[in-house]
Image (tube, rainbow, N blue to C red):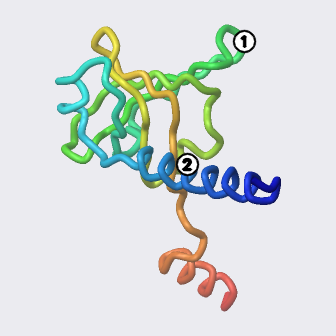
Amino acid sequence: MKKSHIVLILLIAGIVGTFIASFMNTSTSVNFEEAFANPGTEFKVSGFLDKTQEVIYDPQNDHSTTIFYMIDKNDEVKKVHLKQAKPQGLERSESVDLYGKVIDGEFYASDILMKCPSKYNENNHLIETAEAIN
C-alpha cells in the first residue's frame, strides 16, 4: 500500500472520529430534580443565575472554585460548585448551561456555558437611538 493511501485512510478515520465524538458529546438539558435523582451521573442543567444570592469567589484561598446559586427551568434553586475561576460576565448572563454531577447532595459543575445579553437586542437599540437623538 502506498504511503499516500495510508495517510488518506488515517485522515478519513480522524475526521469520522471527530464527528462521532461531537455527536456523542451533545446532551439534552435536564432539571435539578433529575440530576439529584441520579447522583454521580454527568448532566447538562440549564437555567439562570440567582442574582438575589452572592457569587462566592476567593482567589486568595481557592482560585479554581466559584460558588453560586442557579435557578433551573422548573424554578428550583440549587447551590453550584463550579470547578473553575469565576467566569467573566457571570452576573450579566441571561442563561447558564452547566455540565456536572451531584456529589454528596450538591451540584459540582466542571464546565459552564453562558449566554450573555446581546448589544443588538431591541431594547438596547431603542435606548441607543433615544440617546443619539438627545
- Is 60 placed left or right of 94 in the picture? right
Residue 91, how many percent across, how many down? 53, 43
- The residue at the far bottom in this view is 133
Q: Residue at x 51, y 76 (%)?
A: 121
User: Element type at marker 2?
Assistant: helix
| Frontmost residue, 51 versus 103 | 103
Give whichever of 22, 108 is nearer the camera: 22
Percent x, y for residue 36?
22, 24
Q: Do the residues bearing badges 1 and 2 touch, measured as CB atoms within 8 Å?
A: no
| Circle on res. 17 | 2
Residue at which label 1 appears: 60
Q: Position of residue 3 (x, y in %)?
A: 82, 53
Whether residue 47 sits left or right of residue 98 in the image: it is: left
Quadrant containing the C terminus is bottom right
Q: Which mark is residue 82?
A: none
Q: CA distance from mark 1 to mark 2?
A: 41 Å
Name the residue at 19% across, 44% down. Answer: 74
Q: Residue at x 80, y 59 (%)?
A: 4
Label 1 sits on what residue type? Answer: Gln
The residue sitting at 51% across, 26% down in the picture is 82
- Nearer to the camera, 34 or 10: 10
Looking at the rendered structure, the kind of residue marked 2 is Gly
Crowdedness near tag 2: few (<14), some (14–19) or many (≥20) residues, C-alpha within 10 Å: few
For the residue labelled by badge 1, is the local secondary structure a helix, a strand or a loop? loop
Task: Point out the tag, 1 or 2, that comes first from the N-terminus.
Answer: 2
